[in-house]
Amino acid sequence: MPKSQYVDPNRVFDPGYIRFDDIPVCRYSLTLNDEKKLYSKEDLVRIYHDMATIREFETMLNEIKTKSVYNGVEYNNPGPAHLSLGQEASAVGQAYCLDNNDFTFGSHRSHGEIIAKGLSSIKKLSNDELYEIMKTFLDGNILKVVEGKEEVKGDVKDLAEDFLLYGALAEIFARRTGFNRGLGGSMHAFFIPFGIYPNNAIVGGSAAIALGAALFKRSNHKPGIVVANCGDGALGRGPVLEALNMSSMDQIRELWGEGGGMPILFNVFNNFYGMGGQTKGETMGWGHAARVGAGVNPDQMHAEACNGYDPLAVIDATTKQKDRLLRGEGPAMLEVITYRTTGHSPSDSSTYRTAEEIEAWKNADPIKAFRTKLILGGIATEAELDEIHDTIVRRMTKICRMAVDETISPRMDLTKEPDAISSIMLSNKKVPSMDTTREPEVLIPKEENPRLKSLKVKSRWAYDEKGEKLPKMKVYGLRDGLFEPILDKFYEDPTLIAYGEDNRDWGGAFAVYRGLTEALPYHRFFNAPISESAIVGSAVGYAMAGGRAIVELMYADFIGCAGDEIFNQLSKWQSMSAGILKMPVILRVSVGNKYGAQHSQDWTALCAHIPGLKVVFPATPYDAKGLMTEALNGTDPVIFFESQRIYDIGEQFHKGGVPETPYEITIGEPDVKREGKDVTILSIGATLYRALDAAKILSDKYGVEAEVIDARSIVPFDYSKVIESVKKTGRIIITGDACERNSVMRDMASNITELAFDYLDAPPTVVGSRNWITPCKELDPFFFPQADTIVDAVNDRLIPLKGHVSTHNFTDVEKIDRAKKGI
Amino acid sequence: MANAVIMPRQGQSVESCIITEWKKNVGDTVKKGDILFSYETDKSSFDEAAEVEGTLLKIFAEAGDEVPCLDTVCIIGAEGEDISSLIPAGAESKNEKPETEKESKQEEPKTTTVVSAPEATGEVKSGERLKISPRARALVIKTNADLSFVSPTGPDGRIIERDIQAALDAGHTVSALVSENQLAGKIEKPTEKAETPAVFTTAPTSAPAPVSDYTDEKMTQIRKVISRSMHTSLTELAQLTLNTSFDASALVALRAKLKANGEALGLANITYNDMILFAVAKTLATGKYKALNANLIDNGETMRYFNGVHLGVAVDTDRGLMVPTVFDSQKLTLNDLAKTTKTLITDCQSGKVNPDVLRGASFTVSNIGPTGIESFTPVINPPQTAILGVCSLTKRVKEKDGAPVFYPCIPLSLTIDHRAVDGAPAAKFLSDLVKNLESFDLLLTK
């Protein structure tokens, strides 16, 4: 809470009412004569054309899915196809209002939105711009397929229409000539040059991501708005509600300076069914989706509902919302009432609704209705519209024939190119600034930063000249090693933003950000609501839009609250986009140790399990700075684990202390912190210091010299140093604070066993935490690995130490028993 | 009444704070709410405001000092008031380094670890699956260490690297074939056979078995070494023995002279054996019989020829046969050779021989001494290719100028590994050796 906003006890208890304005529902009432003044014949015919194109595209998919043939083109498509037949007017009406600068995000049911937005961009872009996009996209691979096969030779718009439909269909059929080389597929297709951003197979998955793209526009003063499309079922999802709430943060208008509210439209295509559940009358209670938006902020998010079966009503409503966003009055919400006449997917036989209901909606078909309106209104003749329809069918047949043809639309060949997917899992680029064309916005020159000044008098080495340990208060600590490169990057990359819970003013729960509040304006550094999904999800969208973000979840335990955003979104979009998107996002999480079971967990294993994430866990100030610098210069998502045990620890290993100048430590390289010949101890995170204590006991009492290796990184991880050490010692303990079962330590033990089998004198042994809840601080030694636990493991599993009596039970019997009991 | 101002505790984890700036000086008047000083924790900075009015009478920490939480920082009261009861003990010497870091840098008395032999955690049993670490197994494959001498010291009776190394250090190796069998679990220990003689398992029922009077004794370690080594030698080498003898008159004459005058000249007690060793060294040093001064190694695939003559000297001790080596014996004078040999023999008998001299020989001489034995079959100590057996000195008759005369005779038995060398060159060597021994005077002058 910023000090500038005063909570006055004399005012907050004043009696009053919270008042709501009426929420308009289907209030569009223009007559055809009014509409004729607003739209040219060309406009109206184009609306018809675009709707009919979507209808034919999805009809084709339905035929292929259900009959394996469309107009004589035979094909069996094993992949998904979630159709939106019936919803065409909703998609076309929306896209009609959007420019190429406006971004759309969607759901698994977004073929219609992609085609509508694409056709809208084709209409609005110049021929030269269009051709340039087609020529450069994926090295012109898609253009090569469609060029020369257009209806009207030399017509770039005609060519672009082929390009759009073919690129989308080839993607749906998982061809390497698809928009994302077939790695996205039906539910994830997108095409950024037309402002079509990723669609998401996780219901409601796009809301927070779209918010992030809007945040990018707001924080970097970019033109245009962002539309987050979802279905009515998505309103049951927590991350969607988080995104609605976060987009409405008071600070955006109160504290962020010029620019007004968040330029985002949450657009709910309400087709009454979340898969088979009826949102109105069964699975939810709001009646109208717009009601949800109306409760979010005093503007009621300008929420209203419109008739999604009338494209002109949708255009009317969307235009009003867009104008509000451009005036800085965002965020906004629009409920577009619509209906899908086919099942959730072709395998859905619609057992949850009556044939009568479907039939009634088919009779109300928006395309038929609009066609009748154009003919009866004297705008177009039946013959003209028939001609349009025939052209669409010819085009669709041609596109379909090309997309199923293995010779011109091959799939990725993983026999010839076995690394085709490996090479795009991570981007591994170095881009120090995401935008070199402008100066970063800051409040004070870097040299005047109060934290930097206070660091000047601190020792960057943990010991004084006599070799005595300096008091922690006088030493440059690990938290300073994180702060320095972050501050540097804020003065280098104008797109960099940082946010999370309690980041500003407080300086972060663990004081890493102390000194940033003075340096940065609110729109680059702010407190987020307690909404982990929205925090991580928005960072994903922020990066998709071209920025770099550091977000923080405070405790690592809160990873669970942002599960989908970390595991399905942050991790996957680089590869699902075939490497087109970059994801320069650092997610900081802190491992606690004295606040009980839900605030003390090392969840590195969860993150390391998910392909597409880098995971690091530094334990020294030198390593923290080097790894943070590397992460900040990179283009990959990095889960940055920190430990609350050691934020204040000084540098004890890197001779000369932590350098003031920037330097990088390659993510993936472990570091030998103590040399030894008898046993190797590989440690993850803060356990390093207990491992070193164990090494001292082993040396002093038993003459056993331990080599202690600090993993530093978890993904990627270079095993060579560890294997080299094991070849020397023949024995290894892997230790860390995570619960032992299925941990990173177990994975490492398994890999080391494979890689150094003939050199092992004992089985690689894991010393992790017990598979329990974390008990209170006073019981720490029974749960977390300690120096004596490690020594006991050496004695019991690796090499009996003369005269040593273990107090921990490392026997096989105990191991089997624990596993059997699940503890 | 004066009041002490203490350093507040800002959170459970904070143990001390650093005073960053004093806003008031000693003697200043202080009002309620006045900021006295600023201080910081590692996470944040704070201002400490006065809660009482008065004069700042005394401060106990300067800016930059670290003060443990709840310690007194300063005292506010009336001018001239007695504040002695508020001054914390030891506070007068405030310039001393705060003792917040309890870590002592004193060099802890380093316990010198006496690395004694680790305790066995199990036993290697023949016929059972061998419990051995991959690393130890790899070392066995590389060195053919003899597993029958290995005592497991790893967890749960597992053989680990150090156990194999211990066997190697004691010189226990076997052939590749035996090693393979051992790794497959077939580890024959001589004692096991003796313990379970199958013939005694069924006692006759009709008559009581005669009570046999015997004592079972475990083989000593050295006995086991000899046993293994001799067994390997006879089962794996192609041994062939050639017998001859020589006229020891020259040696007898020299020995008589030495007995009379040697001590006066400072010469050692030079024995017949020393003289034979000397002759062997000189004969082999000619380089004409290098296959006899060699090791056959690498599973019988490589001959290792030695430039020096490293003579193994078989010594009978109370604990069994030992064979110390006289390295580069060809360089020694007879007197020095005798001295060296004497020392080695004494060391072996007293048990203080350096294990390093118990290997590395290129040729062995085994003197059976004054036992009346006239011929025997010495057994080669692999990987050497030959061994010379020296029998007892006897009187023999030979024909001289048509008449029988007695002469002192010493028979020699040379065993060679026929894989490494053939009989003819071995015979030639023996013949040269005999010539050298019979004209020992000339050999000495060479």
Image (spheres, coloured by chain):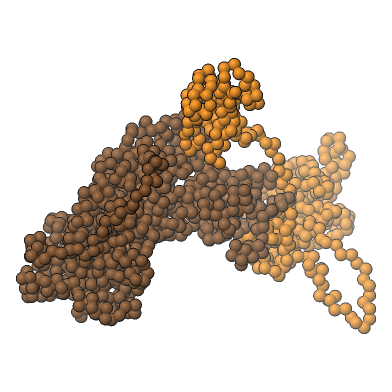
> Residue A469: where, in percent of width, then height?
57, 34
Q: Residue at x 81, y 52 (%)?
A: B315
Residue A822 visible in the shown view: yes
Q: Which of A674 and A277 is in front in this view?
A: A277
Q: Which of A191 and A256 is in front in this view?
A: A256
> Residue A814: where, in percent of width, then height?
65, 62
In the image, taking residue A485 as reference, residue A170 lies left or right, namely left
Chain letter for orange? B
Q: Residue at x 18, y 72 (%)?
A: A366
Tell me if residue A722 comes above or below residue A386 in the rendering. Answer: above
Q: Residue at x 65, y 33 (%)?
A: B106
Which residue appears farthest toward the front when viewing the image? Answer: A15
Tell me if residue B254 comes above or below residue A161 in the rendering. Answer: above
Which residue appears farthest toward the bottom when viewing the image? Answer: B206
In the image, taking residue B96 as reference, residue B348 lies left or right, namely right
Q: Nearer the viewer, residue B129 or A684?
A: A684
Q: Chain A is drawn in which colour?
A: brown
Q: Nearer the viewer, residue A665 or A213?
A: A213
In the image, taking residue A120 as reference, residue B423 lies left or right, namely right
**Quarter of the C terminus of chain A within the rendering:** bottom right
